[in-house]
Image: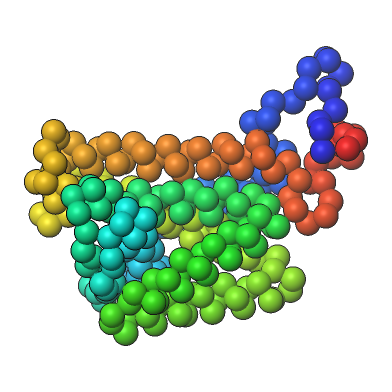
Amino acid sequence: MAPTPDPSGSSPSLLSPNKEQVTTLWIIGGYMIGILVLWQMPFLKHLLYPFKLVTIGLHEFGHACMACVSGGKVKSITVDPNLGGLTTYVGNRRTQCLALPAGYLGSSLLGGILVFCGFNITASKGAAIMLILCLVLTMFWARNLLAFGICFFFAGLVGLLWWLDGGKYLKYFTLFIGVMSCIYSILEILDMLVLRKSNGSDAEQFAEKYGIFPAQGWGFIWLLVSLVFLVGAILAGIAAFKDNGSGSSSGNPSSAGTN
């Protein structure tokens, strides 16, 4: 719907959130705060454990997907119960150059797409299809029970939420997984930058192979890109989805425009 100009004669900005979008922004903010608070909190941090595992799976999927796209061949994906993951693949130098950063950046990009689509119920259903596809492909490459099982569980959960009450809860789930994927990548990179946990990391391997910057330098670049994905997804969601996708406008009747 096209916005109707206000009495002053100027149209509302595309980046001015309506009432429904303000609610979505509060939900995103709540998810971020909840994740950050629970991240290392004794006992309660275990509430995030399955979500961390599936996010690691999606991180490894980013490596695997880029390896395939760049002409390589994926041999396996494994997820460690100690919150580690490994993707093994074969390929040329170009494959390694593209696949190494695709874990953090791919996870952040996927998270950004899920956050973007979470502003609209219909779009969130499209995002759910994409998420299921990513999980199924990760299951295909999985070579340990944990990697297969966690992806199978979350793919089934997405399907259940799609069926439950017309899928109206799917929006909140895709938003959470999107925020979790972005936050996970950002926090992991910050650990590397602040706590110097670069030993064996993707950034350290990338720095060893291609130089130019040390591991922390590449980590900082990836951090900036991840932040751009998250902030860009939120701004794009506000601009694109002035209708919440439920079949009715989320704005006030007096500000509704005509088709």
Residue 212 is left or right of residue 131, and the answer is left
- Residue drawn 85% across the image and 28% down it: 4
In x, y percent, where is residue 226?
38, 43
Q: Quadrant of residue 10?
A: top right
- Does 123 sit above or below residue 194? below
Q: Which quarter shows the N terminus?
A: top right
Asked whether the viewer can see residue 72, the reply is yes
Residue 111 appears at what percent x and percent y?
Answer: 46, 53
Which residue is rendered at x = 27% and y = 60% of the image?
A: 72
> What residue do we see at 34% from left, 36% from top?
224
Give the percent coordinates (x, y) of residue 219: 23, 42
Location of residue 74 by image quarter: bottom left
Colour mapping:
rainbow
In this rendering, is residue 195 above or below 129? above
Horizontal and vertical percent position of residue 154: 48, 75
Is residue 184 at least partly visible in the picture? Answer: no
Front-lying residue, 92 or 112 = 92
Number of marks in the rendered image: 0
Q: Kindly give the residue lying farthest to the top in the view shown.
A: 8
Above or below, 65 relative to 93: below
Above/below status of 172 relative to 227: below
The one of 202 and 198 positioned closer to us in this rendering: 202
- Quarter of the image for the C terminus: give it: top right
Q: Is residue 88 left or right of residue 244?
A: left
- 142 to the left or right of 122: left
Q: Residue at x 17, y 47 (%)?
A: 206
